[in-house]
Each structure stands twice: as C-alpha cells, then as structure tokens.
Image (cartoon, helix red, strand yellow):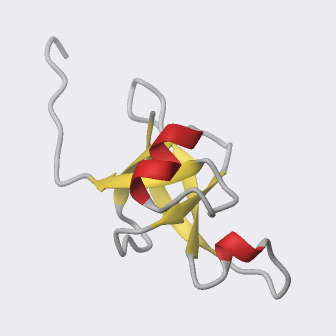
Amino acid sequence: MILGRVVGRLWATRQAAGLTGRKMLLIRPETAAGRETNRLVVAVDGLAAGPGDRVIVAHGSRVRDLTVGADVADKDIVIGIVDGHELKGR
C-alpha cells in the first residue's frame, strides 16, 4: 500500500472495457518522512476522492476484485481517503 496525494485526473478516449465509466486519478506517493516523490501512480477511484486529498492506494488483483470488480483493467485502487495520521517517535 502507498500513502499519497491526488494531484490530478487522467482520462482517455480509448481504454480497456473494464475502465469505462471509472474515474482514474494521478497519485503522487509520499516517502516515510511525509515528503512527496517525483513518481506518479494511476489508480482507479471508487471513493470520490479529489485533487489535494491524501489517499491510501492498494495494489493487487485481490484488492481490485473485492473493491471495484474483476473486470477493471488496473490493479492500483484507492481504498481510503485519509482524514489524519500520527507517527510515533517523531
């Protein structure tokens, strides 16, 4: 799983059938220190997350099957919108 921030949306006029009607988000992962990386992850959103939201993204076919369905052609899925977090010892 990764913790990251929604930095935008992605859309395509041609896409796999399982993505039709699905919102795809651009997520910028954070490091353990809470800094954003230069990397981007495209994740399917089923929770109505939006730009600026901190989200949890899980990867894998099991996560996809249990959340958005096996017909979705992506294995990175937004599974939570973060309200806050605490890191002990810092």
Residue 36, relative to residue 11: is it above or below?
above
In the image, residue 2 lies at what x, y percent? 46, 36
Residue at (51, 60) in percent of width and height: 69
Residue at (39, 25) in percent of width and height: 33
Rendering quarter of residue 3? top left
In the image, residue 35 lies at what x, y percent? 46, 36
Which quadrant is the N terminus positioned in?
A: top left
Rendering quarter of residue 43? bottom right
Residue at (25, 52) in percent of width and height: 82
Residue 62, relative to residue 75: is it above or below?
above
In the image, residue 24 lies at what x, y percent? 59, 70
Q: In the image, is 77 to the left or to the right of 55?
A: right
Give the residue furthest to the top: 89
**Residue nearest the viewer, comparing 84 with 75:** 75
Residue at (30, 53) in percent of width and height: 80
Total marks shown come to 0
Rendering quarter of residue 60? top right
In the image, residue 47 lies at what x, y percent? 34, 69
**Residue nearest the viewer, comparing 59 with 33:** 59
Residue 30, relative to residue 23: is it above or below?
above
Q: In the image, is 48 to the left or to the right of 77?
A: left
